[in-house]
Image (cartoon, rainbow, N blue to C red):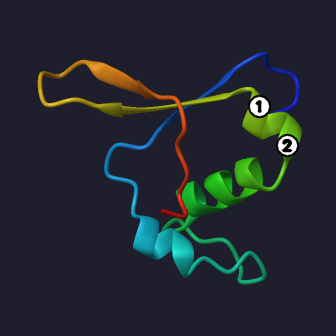
Amino acid sequence: MNSYDKIHFNTTGFGKINFSRFDPKVPLTYRNYTNWEMHTIMNDTALLQKTIFYKKATDGSYQILHSYSPFY
């Protein structure tokens, strides 16, 4: 991930409750890849600074989230 200038993270449907239960010490399965990606970004300042978070709006367009956090 460090070789890219920007990382795009689509938060549409992202489960904050499931993320709050994510344990990085547990083996990675297909059900928690997105949680692992979010955890990795949130715990690496360089990755966080280059990440653009967005979600799908009701009209089908995408809205950039300027101050996104999975914690609230």
Q: Where is residue 8 shown, x and y percent of the image?
A: 57, 27
Disc 2 to disc 1, C-alpha distance: 6 Å
Tell me the tag on residue 34. Answer: none
Left or right: 68 in relation to 16: right
Q: Residue at x 71, y 83 (%)?
A: 26
Image marks 2 and 1: residues in contact by CB distance under 8 Å: yes
Residue type, numbered disc 2 = Thr
Q: Where is residue 61 shown, x and y percent of the image?
A: 24, 18
Q: Where is residue 44 shown, x and y percent of the image?
A: 85, 48
Residue type, numbered disc 1 = Gln
Q: Residue at x 54, y 75 (%)?
A: 20
Q: Secondary structure at mark 2?
A: helix
Badge 1: how crowded within 10 Å, few (<14), some, or many (20+)?
few
Residue 17: image quadrant is: bottom left
Q: Looking at the image, which is closer to me, 72 or 9?
A: 72
Q: Residue 60, relative to residue 71: is it above or below?
A: above
Q: Secondary structure at mark 1?
A: helix
Tell me the tag on residue 49. Answer: 1
